[in-house]
Amino acid sequence: MVIISGSASSAHLPGLATPDGVWMGVWASDIENYQLPSDRLSEVDIKRCNDLLKDPRYRSKFWQNELRTFIKIKKKAEQQAFSRYGLTYVVDEYLPAKLKQVEDMRNKGLI
């Protein structure tokens, strides 16, 4: 979100934000949809998710759902978790599908 909206500590520097950016990391829904190997959220992770639920930058339905899903499943994962499907899965399958999903969500005004 710092890339999208800028950081509070750099608010005095114009042009550092990229409002059209989209987070392409592993979404909470990806952990469930792809049955990814994961790590347990720490208490600090859960607190951060709860804090982000209150942050105005995360008010969209998309972010609220993803943050609530992280809290519900109490899991996190990195893109390396997709290696369970093979070395080229991220490039050949996941990223094209994710880019299409993001495009569809943008067209519907969800992100």
Image (tube, rainbow, N blue to C red):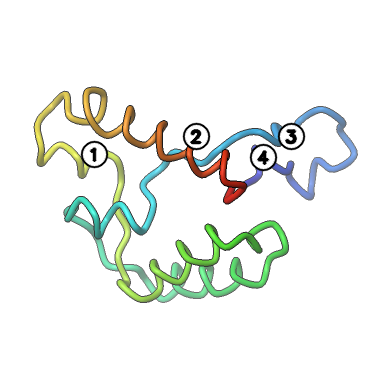
User: Within 10 Å of the Cα at label 1, are there few (<14), some (14-19), or many (20+) other Cα atoms?
Assistant: few
Q: CA distance from mark 2 to mark 4?
A: 16 Å
Q: Earlier in the sequence, mark 2 or mark 3?
A: 3
Of the two numbered discs 4 and 1 in the rendering, the one whose residue sits closer to the viewer: 4
Disc assigned to residue 17: 3
Q: Which residue is at the front of the view, 11 or 68?
A: 68
Q: Horizontal and vertical percent for residue 104?
A: 48, 39
Q: Earlier in the sequence, mark 3 or mark 4?
A: 4
**Secondary element at tag 2:** helix
**Labels 2 & 1 near each other (Cβ < 8 A):** no
Q: Horizontal and vertical percent for residue 98?
A: 37, 36
**Labels 3 & 4 near each other (Cβ < 8 A):** yes
Q: CA distance from mark 3 to mark 4?
A: 5 Å
Residue placed under numbered mark 2 in the picture: 103
Residue 28: quarter of image:
bottom left
Of the two numbered discs 2 and 3 in the rendering, the one whose residue sits closer to the viewer: 2
Amino acid beneath label 3: Ala
Amino acid beneath label 4: Ile
Q: CA distance from mark 4 to mark 1?
A: 24 Å
Q: Residue at x 69, y 32 (%)?
A: 18
Q: CA distance from mark 2 to mark 1?
A: 23 Å
Q: Earlier in the sequence, mark 4 or mark 1?
A: 4
User: Within 10 Å of the Cα at label 4, are there few (<14), some (14-19), or many (20+) other Cα atoms?
Assistant: some
**Secondary element at tag 3:** loop
Q: Earlier in the sequence, mark 1 or mark 3?
A: 3
On screen, residue 40 above or below 5: below
Q: Is residue 107 left or right of residue 81?
A: right
Q: Earlier in the sequence, mark 2 or mark 1?
A: 1
Residue placed under numbered mark 4 in the picture: 4
Q: Residue at x 22, y 23 (%)?
A: 92
